[in-house]
Image: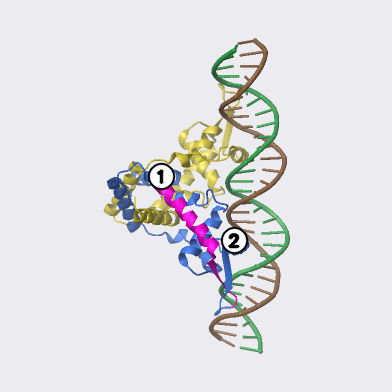
Chain colours: A yellow, B blue, C brown, D green
Amino acid sequence: MNSQDIHQIRAFDRFYTQTLHLTDKYHLQTTLTLVEARLLLEIGENGRNTAIQLVQELRLDKGYLSRLITRLETNGLLQRTPDKRDKRAKVLSLTAAGRDQLALINRRADDQIRRLFVDLTPAETHRVIAAMQVIEGHVAVDPQLKTPNQQ
Amino acid sequence: MNSQDIHQIRAFDRFYTQTLHLTDKYHLQTTLTLVEARLLLEIGENGRNTAIQLVQELRLDKGYLSRLITRLETNGLLQRTPDKRDKRAKVLSLTAAGRDQLALINRRADDQIRRLFVDLTPAETHRVIAAMQVIEGHVAVDPQLKTPNQQ
DNA sequence: TAGCGATAGTTGCTTTTGTCAACAATAGAA
DNA sequence: TTCTATTGTTGACAAAAGCAACTATCGCTA
């Protein structure tokens, strides 16, 4: 891999961070912070989660996460129920209000994408999607990056 | 654009944030924080900058930036020289130590990419790069997202 | 089954990052 | 010259994130 290749990849990264990088905007026009929105997303999609799973998936510090969960619970968006099998753990799930909030976030995220692609023809759009799949198909997770801050 | 398309784009965004998203790691194994590293990058690449330009490019609060600059100057990585044409402004530039630090950061960022691509054949690598260029070529900046926080 | 290291989660404390408002100095235009 | 806008600094503060110590429980093993 030559330095020209690397240069182009870094250019793409800058581009991506600036223009796409949609996850950074989930929370816009809601009362949630970005991480709270990501949390809701994760819990909502995966159904039943335990804090430690979220620590791994979202790469958050567990102390930080614990407080985030408390906040969302206080705001009535999720609930902790004791895990029958493991008395240390608590199962997290969305309340009705949490599901509403999540639905709103999803709508906004979808809208954002539509706006981003609004000027493309269907053919162009599909070329972009195909390109994304090429990238996803080839580049694997760097294990060194996977080891983060769950302590 | 149908919901299947949107789904795939959002899947790519999750993938990208998790596995690539290289910019978040610039500073690793240096004494710099992430923002400081981004500052160094920006000043280093653009040559001569003034604080207000950085406020726009990095979307930082000007008070916050002013302190960051002071810190980097204290650490001997950059210098402020008065602008001849505008006595309010100060031109920022890297010192020799700053350039060294920047070179180190660049090496680390490059290494990160090499590790990420190490299992790909040259042909695969170039397919990925080509795919990146397809995306860059088609998707334009959403002006709504460009509005930042310089007060 | 008692003991022990590992794990899930909480809490206190610190650092990093970011925000807001007030201010001084200069610029640029009326 | 005077008025408004711009550049940068400073103080005060708040939010986000990370680190370490701790409790309770788990699950293995001697």
Q: Please check the rendered image and state whether residue B111 is part of the magenta-colored stretch, yes or no.
A: yes
In terms of secondary structure, where does tag 1 sit? helix
Examine the image and state in which quarter residue A80 appears.
top right
Q: Are marks 2 and 1 on the same chain?
A: yes
- Residue at 52%, 40% (x, y): give it: A148
Q: Which chain does the numbered disc 1 sit on?
A: B
Q: Are marks 2 and 1 in contact (CB under 8 Å)?
A: no
The relative height of residue C24 versus residue A97 in the rendered view (above or below) is below
**Residue B76 relative to residue B42: left or right:** right
| Separation (CA) of disc 2 from disc 1 | 30 Å
In the rendered structure, which amino acid carries the disc numbered 2? Leu
| Residue A139 drawn at (x, y percent) | 36, 43
User: Is residue B63 among what the camera can see?
Assistant: yes
The relative height of residue A22 versus residue A98 in the rendered view (above or below) is below
The relative height of residue D25 versus residue B108 in the rendered view (above or below) is above
Q: Which chain does the numbered disc 2 sit on?
A: B
| Residue A25 drawn at (x, y percent) | 48, 51
In terms of secondary structure, where does tag 2 sit? helix
- Residue assigned mark 2: B72
The relative height of residue C28 versus residue D18 in the rendered view (above or below) is below
Q: Earlier in the sequence, mark 2 or mark 1?
A: 2
| Residue B85 drawn at (x, y percent) | 54, 80
- Residue assigned mark 1: B115
- Residue at 41%, 43% (x, y): give it: B15
User: Label 1 crowding class (10 Å Cα cut-off): few <14, some 14-19, many 20+?
Assistant: some
Residue stretch in magenta: B87-115
Front in this rendered view, residue B90 or A90: B90
Examine the image and state in which quarter residue B83 appears.
bottom right
**Residue B87 relative to residue A21: left or right:** right
In the rendered structure, which amino acid carries the disc numbered 1? Arg
* Helix, strand or loop: magenta stretch: helix
